[in-house]
Amino acid sequence: MHGNEPYCLPIRLRALEWAGDWDDAFGHVKSRRVLFREYLRRAAVWAQAYPEAKAAWPFFDITAYAAPEFRLSHTTEAELKALLARLPSGEVRTTCAGAVRLAELRALDPAALPDLPDLYEPLVLFYERGGEFLRESSGALDLTGVSLRLGARSDYLGNPPVTQLSTTVLDALDADGRITYYTAEDGQGPLLRRRTLRGAQHDELLTRYLHWEATSLIPADETELKEAALTELDELRAARLTGAMATAASPPTPCPSQ
């Protein structure tokens, strides 16, 4: 049973603390930013498939464009209505409603939708790792701990996809301090994380078990990295490489009991 199935999504969303635990949100600020950027990329891709949705990007209910006549089952509609009454903002309500409706539409009629990655799963995971986002007066988005300016929809179409969104991979992205990622020139790994924390530099290598190990504890002939041969990665490419290093796909997320 996958976590985004229609009978599971309302339970996942209902379990959230929408006001948010600030410590939790700040502790996940880096993975939340990656998740949000991946949602924006997927929203841009889906809007390409349904051109009428382009004007509504990035926060829309895609089923309104993909299947305008679609209606939820009575049970799911009642659960969704109760959920939406608790949510903090219109954009959060729109995306949560879209997530539930898209999941049920896909379950009932998979052929009605294009073969595209799940639109809302990165955003649902974002909510689960620290709550809502807010729209600032400047138009930027407050992701709790970091501000993000949207830019143009077309800007996101060129982003590399982040396909591995397991908890293990996302947790590997979160750490204190200012972080820069590096890898070998061929871009195939291993992955080095350079953290600057309270003025001190910490170099850590991501092991095959997705744990960060201080490079000082790893023999030089095992790191396969030389300073002169390093290439810097942005956080999306680092996330993609982290996912590629996972030894196997994460098992489906079980639906929490009611």
Image (cartoon, rainbow, N blue to C red):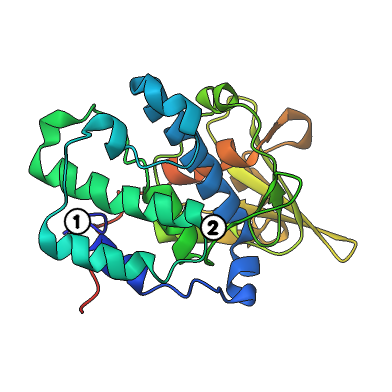
Q: Which quadrant of the figure has residue 227? A: top right
Question: Of the residues shown, which amino acid type is indicated by label 2?
Answer: Ala
Q: Is residue 192 visible?
A: yes
Residue 6 - label: 1
Up the image or down, 231 lies above or below 16; here it is above
Residue 5 in the figure: left or right of residue 88: left
Q: How many marks?
A: 2
Local packing at callout 2 (Cα closer than 10 Å; few below 14, some 14-19, many 20+) is: some
Q: Is residue 246 visible?
A: no
> Distance of mark 2 from mark 1, alpha carbons?
29 Å
Q: Which quadrant of the figure has residue 209? A: bottom left
Report the residue marked by disc 2: 172
> Residue 121 at what x, y percent from top left?
37, 49
Local packing at callout 1 (Cα closer than 10 Å; few below 14, some 14-19, many 20+) is: many
> Regarding mark 1 in the picture, which secondary structure is present there?
loop
Residue nearest the observer in this picture, 109 or 55: 55
Residue 67 in the figure: left or right of residue 22: left
> Residue 138 at what x, y percent from top left?
76, 46
Q: Quadrant of the C terminus?
A: bottom left
Up the image or down, 212 lies above or below 194; here it is below
> Disc 2 vs disc 1: Cβ atoms closer than 8 Å?
no
Residue 45 in the figure: left or right of residue 83: right
Query: Residue at the spot x=49%, y=71% of the render?
Result: 18
For this orientation, the residue located farthest to the bottom is 258
Question: Of the residues shown, which amino acid type is indicated by label 1?
Answer: Pro
> Residue 162 at what x, y percent from top left?
46, 39
Residue 211 - label: none
Residue nearest the observer in this picture, 68 or 231: 68
> Residue 254 at what x, y percent from top left?
22, 66
> Regarding mark 2 in the picture, which secondary structure is present there?
helix
Up the image or down, 42 lies above or below 217; here it is above
